[in-house]
Image (cartoon, grey):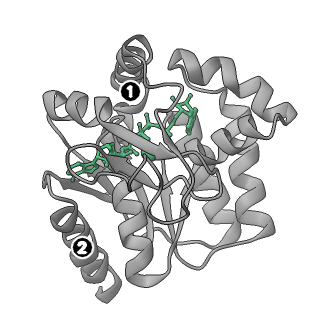
Amino acid sequence: MRIILLGAPGSGKGTVAKRLTAYDGSVQISTGDMLRSEVQQDTPLGLKALKFMVAGNLVPDELILEIIATRFELNPPSGFLLDGFPRTIPQATALDAMFARLGIQLDLVANLVVPEDVILDRLSNRRTCSNTACQEIYNLKSNPPGAGDTCRKCGSLVIQRADETVEAVTRRLQVYRSTTEPLVEYYTRTGQLLVVKDLKTDDVAASIIRAAGAHACI
Ligand code: AP5
Ligand code: MG
């Protein structure tokens, strides 16, 4: 599958990406996970990105575009789930140009639509594996971590992300509405948008698989 996952913070992009990876081996490419890994390793990019991330703001386009171009050009995946990218119009147009250059055809853009009260509840109960090579996602209510707050996959401690404060979540939701939501119209115009209103991960994954399969048969 070659898919973009669009949706507000907490809409479940990372969770369904991991589920879809298990379905057909397509790789999850999460710009948020990549940035958190750079931050933890204290790289120059991580140091530049950190102040934007903890405040709930977007990292500048040029930094993100460099990460994505490097990922696709050095190690082009045959199937991918883009999680958290693009999230600005300039990122989307740059991605279109990169795909045209590399001859990559997108299957669809899945927009995960989740009511705001559900989002806030999900984010306040989220826990994430602290091992940046893993970053498995948990939820104290719907998918709890293992005993002693450990990751059930790799055994590392699970933590709350640095951008999980009330202030940062509020800001991330504002930024989503002002800067990322216009991509819904962008991809409606290209005819690639699939609106997904399911709330259970199994149903979200099934809707995407069905639509991607239908697209592949055209
Ligand atoms: P990023 O890491 O992408 O964060 P986000 O978009 O705010 O999204 P989240 O990861 O918070 O939510 P999600 O949709 O993945 O939901 P999840 O699956 O975890 O970005 C972080 C920061 O990096 C940005 O703020 C920015 O600074 C920077 N950045 C990243 N990409 C960038 C870009 N392209 N340009 C510029 N800056 C960029 O689920 C949430 C919770 O709900 C979990 O607890 C999960 O277990 C639970 N859950 C999920 N689905 C379900 C379900 N169906 N039922 C019940 N519970 C569920
Ligand atoms: Mg995520």
- Residue shown at 34% from the left, 60% from the top: 16
Q: Say if disc 1 is inside 8 Å of ligand 1.
A: yes
Using the image as rendered, state which of residue 73 and residue 36 is in the foreground: 36
- Across and down, in percent, residue 122 comes to 25, 37
Task: Between label 1 and label 2, give the one nearer the viewer.
Answer: 1
Q: Residue at x 40, y 41 (%)?
A: 127
Q: CA distance from mark 1 to mark 2?
A: 25 Å
Residue type at the position of mark 2 = Ala
- Mark earlier in primary sequence (1, 2): 1
Q: Classify residue 137 as left or right of residue 131.
A: left
Q: Which residue is mark 1?
A: 176
Residue 39 place in picture, x, y as percent: 72, 35
To which quarter of the image does residue 3 belong? bottom left
Camera-side residue: 212 or 27?
A: 27
Q: Which quadrant of the figure contains the C terminus?
A: bottom left
Circles 1 and 2, Cβ within 8 Å, touching? The answer is no
* Residue depicted at 50% across the width and 20% down the height: 56
Q: Circle 1 — which element?
A: helix
Q: Position of residue 8 (x, y in %)?
A: 33, 35
Direction bottom: furthest residue = 217
- Examine the rendering and report whether any part of residue 37 can be seen: yes
Q: Which residue position is annotated with label 2?
A: 211
Q: What amino acid is found at the position of numbered circle 1 in the picture?
A: Tyr
